[in-house]
Image (cartoon, rainbow, N blue to C red):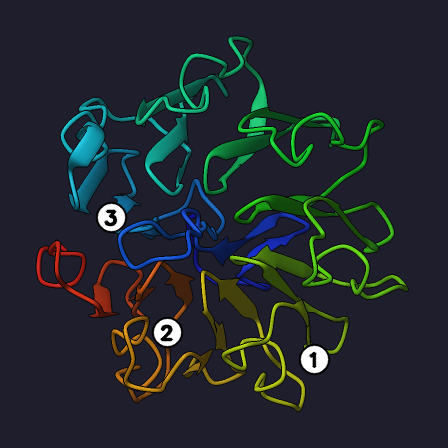
Amino acid sequence: MRCIPAILFLAVFSPGLTGCTGDDTGTTVADTDTDTDTDTSSSQFVVSGGGRHTCAMDPSGTIQCWGDDSGNKVSDAPTDSGHVDVSAGGKHTCALDGSGGIECWGSNSNGQLSEALTSTGYSELNAGRYHSCVLDSSGAIACWGDDEFDQVTNTPTGSGYTAVSGGQYHTCALNSSGGIECWGSDDHWGQLSEMPTGSGYQVVSAGGDHACAIGAEGGLACWGRDDYGQVSKHPTGTGYTAVSGNQYHTCALNSSGGIECWGVEDGGEYDGGQVSDSPAGTGYIAVNAGGFHNCAIDASGLGIECWGNDNYGQVSDAP
């Protein structure tokens, strides 16, 4: 998932904005993450956290990745500039070049690379755990990769969608009225069956087996898996501008640019400090949740701050 400055929303996707979600949302520390993203083509960095790696795009469209390099998901990052979007999934990453063409690298275990679309003109990209989705200029959605739970084949048809966000085995999107549509796995967590009804949502972010959205007044709604409070512990109130969910936690930006994270915080194997070590202060313009770590962009738009699990350099190797 990637994150862009929260100019309007920030979190996983809203009209003209993207959200953040962890992409590799696995069930162990070694295999997790979903992606969440933010808007591109600006004078600010874009950052996207995967399971155990993170990628960022600078204002020139140059991409830099750090963290776990198994499958070459760090070292195979493209070296040229001019990219307009980047999104880190569980074990792969994808980017959009200046023509709206798709470039992916890392693991190809489920067709994340070999099944990537070859046409151009795509405007938004989001990587889930082992699958990815894009929006074209008409707002039509296309997905590829892992389809075990129909997270590819059940992609809605039609146009006018304004955001898309891939989770572990499900995907969510915003339609033209701001309504939420999700597809893929519903198992026993309610990722699909418990999604909010109504319209006017501005951002949606799919985490591991849960998802969160921001309504018209900036209030948060979350649904799905809640064993670590990643749903029930979400903050109340309004004015939130971005939200990004991953495996067992979620982070949001409040109206002052402060970061609020909730979910796993029990000192156990899944707790890498991704909630408890959240930075204080205000003025952040983007936040993105990785598998067990998070990264944010400061008020300058050029500073990246990461925290949480650092066993592969996800935090300490940040540029």
Q: Label for residue 10?
A: none
Q: Label for residue 219?
A: 1
What amino acid does circle 3 point to?
His
Marks 2/3: CA distance?
Answer: 21 Å
Determine whether the residue tagged by mark 1 lies in a helix, strand or loop.
loop
Q: Around disc 2, counting alpha carbons within 10 Å, would you say few (fewer than 14), some (14 to 19), or many (20 or more)? A: many
What amino acid does circle 2 point to?
Tyr
Q: Position of residue 148 (x, y in %)?
A: 60, 32
Please name whichever residue, 44 or 121, is drawn nearer the observer in this view of the structure: 121
Task: Tell me the mark number nearer the camera, choosing from 2 and 3.
Answer: 3
Residue drawn at point x = 31 percent, y = 61 percent = 301
Residue 194 position (above or below residue 75): below
What amino acid does circle 1 point to?
Gly
Q: Tell me which label, 2 or 1, sits earlier in the chain.
A: 1
Which quadrant holds residue 241? bottom right
Q: Tell me which label, 2 or 3, sits earlier in the chain.
A: 3
Marks 2/1: CA distance?
Answer: 18 Å
How many tags in the picture?
Answer: 3
